[in-house]
Image (cartoon, rainbow, N blue to C red):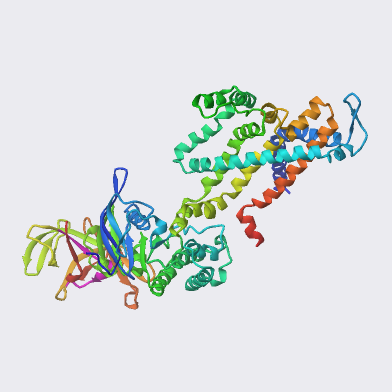
Amino acid sequence: MVDQSASIDIASLVKRHGTTLAVDHVSLTVQRGEFFSLLGPSGAGKTSVLRMIAGFETPDEGTIRIDGRSMEAVPPNRRPVNLVFQSYALFPHMTVAENVAFGPTMQGASRVDIISRVRLALDMVKLSLKEARLPSQLSGGEQQRVALARALVNRPSVLLLDEPLSALDQQLRQEMQVELKSIQERAACTFVCVTHHQEEALTMSDRVAVMHQGQVLQIGSPQDVYEFPTSAFVARFIGVSNELRGMIRRIDGERAIVQSPDLLGEVQIILPTHMAIQVGSPVTLLIRPERLRLSTAAQRMSGEQSLAASVDKVLYSGSDRRYLVRLGEHVVWNVRVPNDESRRNGLVRGDTLHVRWQISDAVVLTE
Amino acid sequence: MKTSAPAGRAEFSGRAVCWWLIGPGLLWMGLLFFVPLCLVVVISFASRGTYGGLVWSFSLTNYLDLLHPLYARILGQSILLAAVTTVLCLIMGFPLAYFIARAAPRRQGVLLLLVMIPFWTNFLVRTYAWMFILRTEGLLNTLLLKLGVIAAPIELLYSNTAVVIGLVYGYLPFMVLPLYVALERVDRTLVEAAWDLYATRWAMLWQIIVPLARPGIMAGCLLVFIPSLGAFLTPDLLGGARSMMIGSLIQHEFLVARDWPLGAAISCLLMLFVVGMMSWSLHAAKPLSRQEDES
């Protein structure tokens, strides 16, 4: 059965580069109109997946369907997708308007049609006034928008973006994240974006697939992959995560007690329902720095966990303070505290205190 | 003052070093290239003595003689043969250069070396080899007869065809090298982008690759056209008396007819033509960046 609402349907895709598996049995479905990101470190195979969707690389195994149609043996110029290249790949000898008109011209659109479509596309990216310029006369952000217009003018059923914001500086990158998202909504087009930048992926995407060593580790909404990572890799790659390794000591209904060799005290957790955990199972706890609170008092509210710690380092970063606190000889955690007025006189190195968190905020992983 | 004195001396010694470095080359070019060139221009206004000597009297007779249709026909034929040579070199050289430019980086060096290997043998020797291949009872005719492709030997040697074959053979590397440099610089992702934007292979070639490689195409064409136009060895050996080119004519006037002033006048005319054509094509092949500044 072919899913009718699927824009892209990828089934057990494999690509080998020599003896290494660049893409290792990747299966995923992108819904129509969705902003979908492939997130992962360099070498994770995400660009390979994108290039196979575009048609520049041929899969060794598996299938790619776009709008329900198999893309086997379909060359890039016959696919209903367009790619925005990482380097933009604007034609240096053509003006902005000529660049944007290239696709429709190649498709044999009429002159009148081309002119109106180019105008619309340039309006969409707010570059109508610069249509007679050459790419080299534009700023990086403008070149990026020409690349977008040149792809969107073809009304592709899927727009592919390869590290779209990597060549821009920090300020412009944040503006373009918002811009890209709104362009996607205006164009009502499926976007598949490759990036190694986790904040970018979380901000723009409806769903994210986290890739590592050729495999998709987790697919979900930005909230899902951030709050409920299913593996230590995903937790570490997306944001900062505090970890604690330990073993289940006791199980008490839906709660359990974990003991860690690195720690004096015991930690209470909520057992994840979907995992089979017994007494003696090794587990890893993951807690985000912003979910931790610091207090001098040891007593805790119900549903809270508290551990004794000492301040190792204080890092001031304007909007918040980061504390590195030591819980044991080998355990140093990150705690992020918003820089509001009450904490103006913050803690200093060597202070002893208690780290507290809601036990429901700790993510439990079995290895 | 204290600080400026050593600085001044350093600059002086720097300039002295500079002159020592460029001096030999400058002297060489000046004495052996510029002075003789001036001599040729001067001689072109002199006239021929009864026994082939020079008579130093200023006259324009040599240039007026060149108005004779015979010379126009030889110049026209030379331009035609050089143009045909250039076009054939471009047609054959472009795919070759593209292939080398897109080969694995490690193989590119080997392939370029192969293109240049013919230079290891003297040009005259290689042109003689072509005479053996092309003549009536030569290698090519023998082979074609044996294979039954032709019934009677074809007369190839001493024709314009033979001249063009020789010129194309000799100057093909001069086309391949600048084309390779230009094509190697064409960003592959631009070609991919065109492919992604529905271009056929033909469109990728004409809309993207050729325009971006234009400076290299121009350079290659000049490097083939100019020496082909002035060539005298190849037309002499392979063309015989039937296909006179302007280079052979100049050589003939200087060495056989012993009419130095006329030979010099033809040389000047050829030089003017070449300089005019070069400045035109340099203008046409201007890099993109400079055209942008004008707009």
Asked whether residue B86 is in view, the answer is yes
Res. B165 image quadrant: top right
Q: Residue at x 63, y 38 (%)?
A: B85
Is A296 one of the magenta-colored residues? yes
Q: A305 and A126: which one is in front?
A: A126
Q: Is residue A326 visible?
A: no
Q: Quadrant of residue B135?
A: top right
Position in image of residue A66 (x %, y %): 32, 62
Report the residue at 28% width, 60% height from top: A210
Question: B177 above or below A343?
Answer: above
Quick check: A287 above or below A330?
below
User: Residue A288 lies in what quarter of the image?
Assistant: bottom left
Question: Picture coordinates of residue A201 (x, y %)?
Answer: 34, 65
In the image, what residue occupies the spot 42% across and 68% down?
A155
Left or right of residue A207, residue A364 in this image = left
Where does residue A193 sit, x and y in percent of width and height?
A: 36, 63
Q: As rendered, which of B64 and A159 lies closer to the eye?
A: B64
Q: How many marks?
A: 0
Residue A130 forms part of the magenta stretch: no
Most distant residue in the bottom direction? A341
Q: Out of A228 and B178, give the one closest to the viewer.
A: B178
Tell me if residue A253 comes above or below residue B233 in the rendering: below
Q: Which residues are magenta?
A: A283-298
Q: Position of residue B212 (x, y in %)?
A: 56, 52
